[in-house]
Image: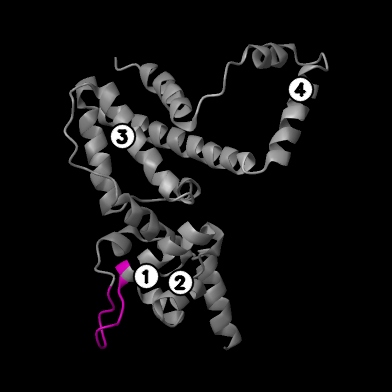
Amino acid sequence: MSGDRAASERAGDRGAGATGVDPQQLWLTSGQPRRGRRPAYDRETITAAAVALADAEGLDAVTMRKVAAQVGAGVMSLYSYAPDKEALLELMIDHVSGELPTTVTSTGDWRTDLKAIARLQRALMLRHPWLPAALSTRRTPGPHTLAFLEHALAALRPTGLDGAAKLEIFAQLTAFVAGHVSYEIAQAAVSRSPDRAAAEARYLAAVAADGHHPELAEALAASGRPLGPEDTFTRFLNRLIDGLDSD
């Protein structure tokens, strides 16, 4: 492989294009090369391979070279479908967003509907643990994401809020779910390591007893029986949604 070609591949994996992702080119084109014979794969196949790789090995494992190997393509040929890793990540996010339903009947109670939307988002992120981190880099929503956004905005119609406020609420909700799922994943990792969990418990007990953190000591002493992940998420979600003001 020539030095120029290797450098091009490394830049593609970093997603370090000078102009970034062009949303019109990414979402409003077919993603198929315009010339030459019909390829043996397409954008959907490439994106699905990248998602499977991220699901199995994490987001850092997704490189243009590995994705190409998954579909049996040459690395350089992938750039006809995704010009760099940044674009591929956008495609991956929208691909899994296609798992979200968009035809759920509204109850007319926007708080109930918004909580249902949050639970759908949480389930999606738990199926694809790389998604919370990926969302922090997303620039433009693709067609599946837009369809779910349309559903969420319709659920917020009874609030009487203007469009900007409804978009802010949806962004706030998505950020909350992404942050909470990241926490859930981290806590699950700790629970799988009894030694680490015990060490953290000893540390907090020592901090609470040092006399310098009375508020924390009181909070820890008053803590009830730990709730399971579902109940914890519901409690936090209720605090968020019930605290929103629709006026």
The residue at the point 40 percent across, 67 percent down is 49
Give the residue number, with chain letter if any, for mark 1.
46
- Dot placed on the residue nearer the N-terminal end, 1 or 3: 1
The residue at the point 29 percent across, 22 percent down is 111
**Secondary structure type for disc 2:** helix
| Disc number lying in front (3 or 4) | 4
Residue 89's mark? none
| Disc number lying in front (4 or 2) | 4
Give the residue number, with chain letter if any, for mark 2.
67
The CA span between labels 2 and 3 is 31 Å
Give the residue number, with chain letter if any, for mark 3.
117
Give the residue number, with chain letter if any, for mark 4.
205
Q: Residues within 10 Å of mark 1 (few under 14, many from 20)?
A: many
Tag 2 and tag 1, C-beta contact below 8 Å: yes
Q: Nearer the viewer, residue 49 or 39?
A: 49
Q: Please, which residue is most extreme toward the right here?
A: 210
| Disc number lying in front (1 or 4) | 4
Q: How many marks?
A: 4
| Segment tinted magenta in the rendering | 32-44
Res. 160 in view: no
